C-alpha cells in the first residue's frame, strides 16, 4: 500500500501542529528505545526492524523541526521549531551514547541478514563507536555535553548569519548599470534614498552590474561583515568543541574523525585533494585572471591586481565584450514561471516522472507550490517549491526534508528552499534551481528504502553534490533550454546565444575553482589547526589559494555558513564535481533527452539511496571506477 502524504495545517496552525508532530514523535522514540533495550537475544530481523522504527520516528522530528525553523513566516513558530530540533538532538545524543541499546545491536548475529540489512547493522554499529558509546561513564558524559553544546553553538552561528542582514541607503543615481527591473524594484524612500540589503537578490546584481565601484565596495564589505564580530567568538567555541570531541575519541583532529565515513576516507587526503585541484586549475586560473586584469587596466591603468570588488563586475564585462554575452539580454528568456514549468517538464521527461499539482496540499506561505511525483501513475513522493525570499527565511538555496521515505511506511517528501526573484531570473539562478532540484529528485527517487538509514540522499556526504552538479548540465544545453526559455514574444533562446553563454561560462572556471579551494582550505585548516586569529588565517589562505586576495576590514569567516553544517568538508563541492563530470561522460551530449541512459542513471545511482557505497553505484552506472580524467579534460579545454 502506498502511504498518504503528510497533512500540513493552515499557516496559522503550526504552533499546535509542530507540538504534535515533534512531541509525539519524541515520546514515541523514547518508548521505542525502552522496548529496544529489552530485545536482547531477539531474532536479527526483528531487532533491525525495531531499530529502524527508532530511526524513522526521530527522523520525523528532525525533518519537520529543521524545515520550519528555516521557512515558517512567523518568528515564534521558527523558535518553537528550533527548540524541537534541540530536543531531538539531545535525544539523539543520549541514544548514541546508550550502552544498553548498543549492546542489543552489537549482539545481533549478522549471519541470517541480507547484504543491505548487514550493511545497515555495520553502519549503525560504526555510528555508535564514533559517538564513544564504548567509553567509560565519565568520557561519555563529557562527549554528551560536547555534542549538546556543538548543536547550540552551531545554531547560534547560523542564526547570527540569518539575522545579520545589513542595509545601505544610497542615492538612486548610484544604481547606474543595474537592470531596469532592479531599479524599478527599488523605489526611493521618503529620504530620497534607495535601500539595498546584503541578501542575494540585491547583493548579486549590484556586484555584477553596478558601475559604481564604491557602491560595490560598500555592499561587499557589508556582506563580508555579516554576523561579525559576534560570530568570531561563536566560531572559536565551535572549533574548540569539535577538536576536543575528536581527541577524546582518539583521532588526531576533527577532519580525521569527520572524513572516516566519507568517500575521501582520511583527514590528510582532504589537504592533498585541495592542493591537487588547486594545481590542476593553476594554468587556467592564471590565463583568465590576466584577461580580467587587462580589462580592469583599461579603466584604471594604475591597477596592480583584481580584487573581490571587481571580480564579478569585470567578469561580466569580459563576458559581454569578448563573448558577446550580455546577462541582461540573457535574462529576458528566463521568466520565473516558465522556468519552473520547464524544469518540471524536462526532469519529468528525462526520468519518466509526472508532477501533478497536489490538490489537497496546504502550504505554509502563499509563495509555496506543492506537487505529487508519479511514475507510471504510481505516487512516488511529494515536493514543495518555496522559491522566493521573505523576511526571516533561510537565505541560501537548499533542499530540506519534510518526510524521509520508508517503503510501505511513509512517502518521501522534500522541499526546495531558494530565494529567486518572481520576475526575470539570471541564468546562474536557473542553474542553481536545476542543481537544488537534483537533491530533491535524489530524496524522492532514493526514498523507497526499507531502511531509513539509507533513504534518499543518505549516501556518503561528499557524494551528495554529484547528482545535483550533474543536473546542472541540462541547464546549459540549448535543446533543453529551447523547451522553456522564451522571451515575451514566445521566441526561444537562440542556439548561438547559448553557445556563447557556455563559452563565457567557461571563462574563469580555473580562478573560480581556486576560490573554491580557498573556502575548502578555510573549512579544513580551521578545523585541523584552530587558528588564534581567524581573520589573519583567512587572509593568509585567501592569499595562498584565491587569486583575488583579501578585502581589507572584512571577516568572511563570520558568515561562512557552511562551517556549521559541512565543518571540515567543504572540499565536497569540488570532490563531487570530479565525480559529476565523470557521470556526465556517460551521457550523449548531443541528446540530453536520451531516456535510456537517464533512466539507467535513475535506477543505478539515485534509486539505491545509501544502500551501497557511492563508489559502487557510480561504477555500476559508468561501468568502471570513477576517476579524474573527465574533470581534468574539462578544466584544460
Ligand atoms: Zn547542492
Image (spheres, helix red, strand yellow):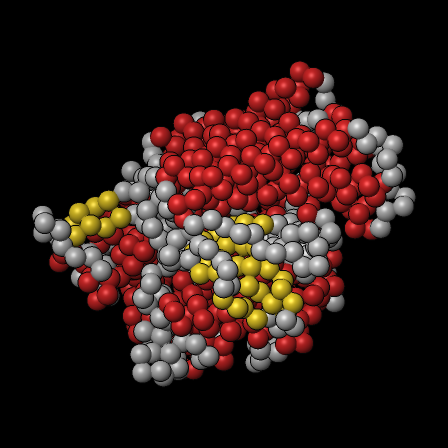
Q: At 57% from the left edge and 25% from the top edge, which residue is drawn? A: 146
Q: In this view, does 627 lie above or below 130?
A: below
As drawn, is 184 to the left or to the right of 546?
A: left
287, 350: nearer the viewer:
350
Task: Give percent across and percent down for residue 577.
Answer: 56, 58
Outermost residue toward the right?
111
Q: In this view, does 48 lie above or below 587?
A: above
Q: At 44% from the left edge and 39% from the top edge, which residue is drawn? A: 15
Task: Give percent across and percent down for residue 322.
Answer: 33, 73
Q: Is residue 304 visible?
A: no
Which quadrant, please, contains the N terminus? Answer: bottom right
Task: Give percent across and percent down for residue 209.
Answer: 26, 61
Q: In which quarter of the image is residue 311?
A: bottom left
418, 100: nearer the viewer:
100
Q: Is residue 87 visible?
A: yes
Task: Give percent across and percent down for residue 550.
Answer: 35, 44
Q: In which quarter of the image is residue 541?
A: top left
Q: At 27% from the left edge and 56% from the top edge, which residue is drawn? A: 206
As drawn, is 23 to the left or to the right of 550?
A: right
Q: In which quarter of the image is residue 51?
A: top right
Q: In this view, does 209 lie above or below 329?
A: above
Q: At 58% from the left edge and 77% from the top edge, which residue is drawn? A: 593
Amino acid at each position: 500500500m502506498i502511504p498518504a502524504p503528510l497533512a500540513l495545517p493552515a499557516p496559522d496552525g503550526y504552533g499546535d501542529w509542530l507540538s504534535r508532530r515533534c512531541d509525539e514523535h519524541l515520546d514515541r522514540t523514547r518508548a521505542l528505545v525502552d522496548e529496544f533495550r529489552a530485545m536482547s537475544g531477539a531474532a536479527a530481523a526483528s531487532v533491525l526492524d525495531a531499530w529502524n522504527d527508532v530511526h524513522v520516528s526521530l527522523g520525523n522530528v528532525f525533518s519537520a523541526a529543521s524545515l520550519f525553523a528555516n521557512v515558517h513566516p512567523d518568528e515564534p513558530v521558527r523558535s518553537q521549531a528550533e527548540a524541537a530540533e534541540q530536543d531531538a538532538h539531545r535525544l539523539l545524543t543520549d541514544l548514541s551514547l546508550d550502552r544498553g541499546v548498543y549492546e542489543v545491536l552489537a549482539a545481533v548475529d549478522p549471519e541470517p541478514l541480507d547484504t543491505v540489512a548487514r550493511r545497515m547493522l555495520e553502519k549503525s554499529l560504526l555510528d555508535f563507536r564514533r559517538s564513544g558509546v564504548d567509553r567509560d561513564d565519565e568520557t561519555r558524559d563529557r562527549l554528551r555535553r560536547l555534542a549538546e553544546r556543538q548543536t547550540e553553538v552551531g545554531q547560534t552561528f547560523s542564526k547570527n548569519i540569518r539575522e545579520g542582514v545589513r542595509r545601505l541607503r544610497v542615492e538612486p543615481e548610484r544604481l547606474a548599470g543595474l537592470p531596469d527591473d532592479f531599479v524599478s524594484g527599488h523605489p526611493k524612500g521618503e529620504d530620497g534614498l534607495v535601500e539595498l540589503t546584503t541578501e542575494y537578490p540585491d547583493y548579486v546584481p549590484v556586484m555584477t552590474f553596478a558601475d559604481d565601484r564604491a557602491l560595490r565596495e560598500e555592499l561587499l564589505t557589508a556582506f563580508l561583515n555579516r554576523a561579525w564580530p559576534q560570530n568570531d567568538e561563536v566560531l572559536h567555541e565551535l572549533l574548540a568543541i569539535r577538536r576536543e570531541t575528536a581527541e577524546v575519541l582518539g583521532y588526531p583532529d576533527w577532519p580525521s574523525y569527520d572524513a572516516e565515513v566519507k568517500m575521501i576516507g582520511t583527514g590528510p587526503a582532504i589537504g592533498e585533494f585541495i592542493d591537487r585541484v588547486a594545481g590542476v586549475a593553476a594554468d587556467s586560473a592564471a590565463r583568465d585572471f590576466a584577461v580580467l586584469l587587462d580589462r580592469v587596466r583599461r579603466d584604471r591603468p594604475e591597477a596592480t591586481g583584481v580584487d573581490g570588488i571587481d571580480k564579478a563586475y569585470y567578469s561580466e564585462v569580459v563576458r559581454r565584450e569578448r563573448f558577446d554575452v550580455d546577462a541582461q539580454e540573457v535574462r529576458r528568456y528566463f521568466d520565473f514561471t516558465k522556468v519552473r514549468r520547464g524544469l518540471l517538464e524536462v526532469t519529468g521527461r528525462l526520468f519518466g516522472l509526472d508532477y501533478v499539482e497536489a490538490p489537497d496540499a496546504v502550504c505554509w506561505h502563499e509563495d509555496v507550490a506543492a506537487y505529487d511525483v508519479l511514475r507510471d501513475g504510481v505516487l512516488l513522493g511529494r515536493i514543495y517549491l518555496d522559491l522566493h525570499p521573505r523576511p526571516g527565511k533561510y537565505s541560501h538555496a537548499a533542499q530540506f526534508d519534510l518526510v524521509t521515505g520508508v517503503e510501505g511506511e511513509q512517502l518521501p517528501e522534500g522541499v526546495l528552499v531558494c530565494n529567486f526573484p518572481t520576475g526575470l531570473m539570471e541564468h546562474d539562478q536557473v542553474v542553481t534551481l536545476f542543481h537544488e532540484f537534483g537533491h530533491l529528485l535524489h530524496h524522492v527517487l532514493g526514498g523507497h528504502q526499507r531502511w531509513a538509514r539509507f533513504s534518499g540522499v543518505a549516501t556518503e556526504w561528499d557524494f551528495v553534490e554529484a547528482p545535483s552538479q550533474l543536473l546542472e548540465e541540462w541547464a546549459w544545453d540549448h535543446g533543453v533550454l529551447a523547451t522553456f526559455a522564451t522571451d515575451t514574444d514566445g521566441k526561444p533562446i537562440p542556439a548561438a546565444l547559448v553557445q556563447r553563454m557556455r563559452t563565457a561560462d567557461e571563462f574563469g572556471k580555473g580562478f573560480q575553482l581556486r576560490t573554491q579551494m580557498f573556502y575548502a582550505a578555510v573549512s579544513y585548516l580551521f578545523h585541523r589547526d584552530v587558528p588564534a586569529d581567524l581573520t589573519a588565517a583567512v587572509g593568509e589562505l585567501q592569499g595562498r589559494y584565491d587569486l583575488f586576495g583579501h578585502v581589507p576590514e572584512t571577516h568572511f569567516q563570520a558568515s561562512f555558513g557552511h562551517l556549521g553544517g559541512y565543518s571540515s568538508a567543504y572540499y565536497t563541492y569540488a570532490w563531487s564535481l570530479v565525480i559529476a563530470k565523470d557521470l556526465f561522460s556517460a551521457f550523449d551530449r548531443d541528446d540530453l533527452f536520451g531516456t535510456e541512459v537517464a533512466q539507467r542513471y535513475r535506477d543505478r545511482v539515485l534509486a539505491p539511496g545509501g544502500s551501497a557505497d557511492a563508489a559502487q553505484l557510480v561504477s555500476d552506472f559508468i561501468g568502471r571506477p570513477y576517476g579524474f580524467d573527465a574533470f581534468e579534460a574539462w578544466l584544460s579545454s
